[in-house]
Amino acid sequence: MTATTSSVCSVLLPEDQQSQARSFLRLLDSLLNQLPKVCPYCDCTAFKVKQKRHCLCSACGKSFNALTGTPLNRLQGRERFLPFVEGWLTGEPAHLVAERLGMDGTTGRIWVKRFLLLMEQTHPELYRWWSAYLYRQEVALPAHIQERAQRFLDWLARFPFEPSSACPHCGSSALIAHGYGNGLPRWRCKACGRMHNRLSDTPLKWLGQMELWRPYVELMLQGFTHQDCVLLLGIAESKGTNRDRNWRPRFLKLIGQQDPVLLEWVIWQNRRRRGQLASEHQDNMRRRRSALLQGPDSACADDHTPDAQ
Ligand SMILES: [Zn+2]
Ligand SMILES: [Zn+2]
């Protein structure tokens, strides 16, 4: 255990999580430096220690080390495990920790996933706090994006109610106010006689459920997919006015017209979200697979000891 362990965690973690973090680092330290106590395959305590802490079970004949059966199994570069996790738990972004330790970004991302899995299994309380913190970091808008987002949202709330200056059908500026339709001011063109509102020549034409536009865009800014938004906001997809069903391309187009930088952010965040969905799917599959392989007994091994034979 290094001397820095107790101080590094205190920078970011609340007090009640600091002891958890130190305990997690101690666990990691013992996984790296101590011999396993039982064979992970058959729970037998009789095994031979071969070189580099590799063990051979006398009962089942399988070889293993302390990391076998943990999420860190077969992860290369174990001399960097502790400095990596120590740096990571101070809140230093994982890719910067990886860079500092001479690793590439992809390895850093894989390590983060594996260490999170281990944390979930061994320190669930710390895991809940830490994964929530990481999530907030991921979706937090940097100041310059926050500013652009605010400008766009203000404009989105304002522009449907502003006076029209030209007919979207013929371009004439000879317009007469003509009451309200669907809650929006309506204009009649003196030249062509047709009606319009401010949404008529925008991607939001006939969209409906205006009260959900702002929360929809806010979720888009955090990378959420249309399907996420439907679930979170309860968008009525079958409404007659929602002819396109998917709001996303409409808002992407509108954001792109207003602020291309904001559009880039939305697309980038969505890519992150899709990656997250894919890895959640992979994790679920992995859990299901290992549950299948381990059989029904393993799930309750802790609280259920079979009768002695
Ligand atoms: Zn064994
Ligand atoms: Zn006209």
Image (tube, rainbow, N blue to C red):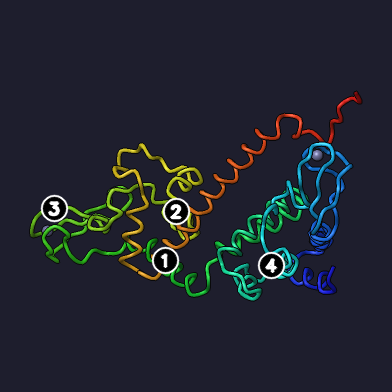
Q: Nearer the viewer, mark 2 or mark 4?
A: 4
Residue in view at x 51 percent, y 46 percent: 232
Q: Which mark is residue 192?
A: none
User: Which tag, 2 or 4, sits closer to the chain's start?
Assistant: 4
Q: CA distance from mark 2 to mark 4?
A: 32 Å
Residue in view at x 42 percent, y 48 percent: 226
In what quadrant of the picture does the N terminus appear? bottom right
Point out residue 118 in the picture as x, y percentages from the top left corner: 72, 52
Q: Nearer the viewer, mark 3 or mark 4?
A: 4
Of the pair 38 and 139, the residue shown nearer to us: 38
User: Which tag, 2 or 3, sits closer to the chain's start?
Assistant: 3
Are dots 4 and 1 in contact, CB under 8 Å?
no
Q: Which mark is residue 88?
A: 4
Are dots 3 and 1 in contact, CB under 8 Å?
no
Per the image, the residue denoted by label 3 is 194
Q: Residues within 10 Å of mark 3 (few under 14, many from 20)?
A: some
Per the image, the residue denoted by label 2 is 216
Point out residue 159 in the picture as x, y percentages from the top left corner: 33, 63
Q: Is mark 4 within 8 Å of ligand 1?
A: no
User: Which tag, 3 or 1, sits closer to the chain's start?
Assistant: 1
Per the image, the residue denoted by label 1 is 154
Q: CA distance from mark 3 to mark 1?
A: 29 Å
Q: Is mark 3 within 8 Å of ligand 2?
A: yes
Q: Residues within 10 Å of mark 2 (few under 14, many from 20)?
A: many
Q: Nearer the viewer, mark 4 or mark 1?
A: 4
User: Which tag, 2 or 1, sits closer to the chain's start?
Assistant: 1
Q: Amino acid at mark 1?
A: Asp
